[in-house]
Amino acid sequence: MSATPWIMFTITALLVILGVLSWYIVKNRKNNCPPDYYSFFLMGLVWVPVGFALHNYFLAALGFVLMIFGLIHKKEWKKNRKCWGKIDKKTRQIVCALATLVGAFVFFGFVILYLLMQGYI
């Protein structure tokens, strides 16, 4: 039996758990801040070339949408920017933990992909 369905199920389950956890954190946040449109623009700026390079045109289209969304709200870029030093300690810890978790998922994804391509799995 192939291990690929179990790997895909595990990744999907972890993404659902991360999504629910993120939703819970955002929902229970005391100080709701407006969106950072500059970050949307930067995400779009990164996703467009990555989408074309990977021949993933959905990702490139989503990048265009994010870029346009960020450019529409260009007047609000400076108003909503937050410096790392101005963020409270608990939020910084949560962001660092989530970034570490995402980095670990990406690393293990590459390890699993390598093992699959070498025929070990």
Image: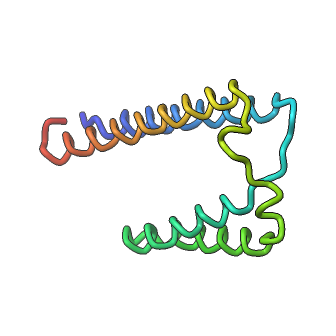
Q: Colour scheme used in the picture?
A: rainbow
Residue at 45% x, 72% y is 49
Residue at 84% x, 44% y is 33
Residue at 45% x, 69% y is 51
Q: Position of residue 72 (x, y in %)?
A: 79, 74
Q: Position of residue 12 (x, y in %)?
A: 50, 38
In the picture, residue 40 is in which quadrant?
bottom right
The tally of labels here is: 0
In the picture, residue 106 is in which quadrant?
top left
Image quadrant holding the N terminus, namely top left
- Vertically, is 116 above or below 21? below
User: In the image shown, does 67 or 3 lie closer to the viewer?
Assistant: 67
Q: Residue furthest front?
A: 85
Q: Left or right: 91 with respect to 31? A: left
Q: Position of residue 77 (x, y in %)?
A: 77, 63
Q: Left or right: 67 with respect to 111? A: right
Q: Left or right: 91 with respect to 118? A: right
Residue at 73% x, 38% y is 86
User: In the image shown, does 8 or 34 lie closer to the viewer?
Assistant: 34
Q: Position of residue 60 (x, y in %)?
A: 52, 71
User: In the image shown, does 31 or 7 lie closer to the viewer?
Assistant: 31
- Vertically, is 46 above or below 2? below
- Vertically, is 107 above or below 17? below
Image quadrant holding the C terminus, namely top left
